[in-house]
Amino acid sequence: MKFPSIFRTASPMRYDIKPRYYDPIKEEIEQRTSRIKKELENEGLLQPGDETNLNGYGTGIRGSFSQYKGIKQRDTSLFSSTAMIRTLLFLAMVMLAFGYIYIGPEIFTYLLYVGMIAAGIFIFFQAKKPGKR
């Protein structure tokens, strides 16, 4: 709400510009299209006022599906699933909480050893794959 005042306060000036665009390529295309349309009308291949397939909408549909290569198969690795990773993280946090309650701070040491063993097994099986180099 504005309070009444005897002084006039400055208000920001409005800036409204309406740009005009000039595209020489589009203008050239329109001129060529109209010239070709007139030539086709003069040769009798096109009736005056006939607008079918001049814009090219119907011509590209026939070949548009020719590059279809089928549905790409997903990677079905156990650890690529987001839900599986989320579940494993949740179970690790629950085990960490209960372990801290029942065992104490030594659970961090035990989990560090378990994590190092799991990382070693993972690296061993990754290095054993013949195609990964």
Image (tube, rainbow, N blue to C red):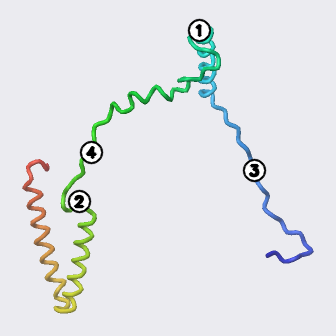
In the drawing, what numbered circle is on residue 72?
Answer: 4
CA separation, marks 4 and 3?
50 Å
Q: Are marks 2 and 4 in contact (CB under 8 Å)?
A: no
Q: Please give the name of the residue rendered at 12% of the width and 57% of the height, measured from the top-left corner.
A: 126
Secondary structure of the residue carrying tag 2 is: helix
What percent of the width, then of the height, locates residue 125? 9, 59
CA separation, marks 1 and 3?
49 Å
Closest to the camera, between mark 2 and mark 3, is: 2
Secondary structure of the residue carrying tag 4 is: loop
Secondary structure of the residue carrying tag 1 is: loop
Instruction: Name the residue beneath numbered marker 3.
Output: 16
In the drawing, what numbered circle is on residue 44?
Answer: 1
What percent of the width, then of the height, locates residue 29? 59, 23
Above/below status of 72 relative to 92:
above
37 sits left or right of 123 in the view: right
Closest to the camera, between mark 4 and mark 1, is: 1
Crowding near pointer 1: few (<14 within 10 Å), some, many (20+)? few
Instruction: Name the residue beneath numbered marker 2.
Output: 80
Q: Please give the name of the residue rendered at 14% of the width and 68% of the height, measured from the top-left corner.
A: 119
